[in-house]
Amino acid sequence: MSDIARVNRKEFTAKLKAEEIDYKRLDVLSRFLTPIGKIEPARRTGASRTQQTRIVRAIKRARYLGLLPYTINDTR
């Protein structure tokens, strides 16, 4: 991952409001997933502890409802 993408993600997270973190906002939540489908850690996204908790909860809720996949291109 390049430094440019990392900076942009941190800037995006800094501007993220609590109301924008919702399980129905797939465009926002998909930015916090790796290409494989794992949830990005807070040290990589620059999210605070509260933001990261809300992001993880929203992603898990969206996965449970079938809005987001659990894995992407799982080729074992």
Image (cartoon, rainbow, N blue to C red):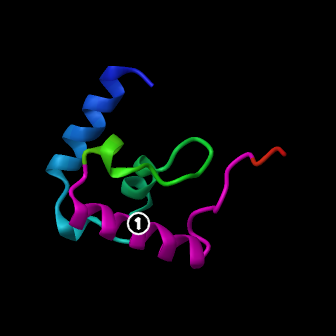
**Residue situated in front as seen by the camera: 65 or 59:** 59
Residue 44: x, y in percent?
Answer: 35, 41
Q: Is residue 54 left or right of residue 29?
A: left
- Residue 51: within the magenta? yes
Q: Is residue 29 left or right of residue 35?
A: left
The number of numbered badges drawn on the structure is 1
Which residue lies under the disc numbered 1?
56
Q: Residue at x 25, y 52 (%)?
A: 47
> Which span of residues is magenta-colored?
47-73
Q: Amino acid at mark 1?
A: Val
Q: Residue at x 35, y 64 (%)?
A: 55
Quadrant, the N terminus:
top left
Residue 25: x, y in percent?
Answer: 38, 64
Residue 72: x, y in percent?
Answer: 68, 50
**Residue situated in front as seen by the camera: 56 or 21:** 56
Q: Residue at x 63, y 61 (%)?
A: 69
Circle 1 packing at 10 Å, graded few (<14), some (14-19), many (20+), is some
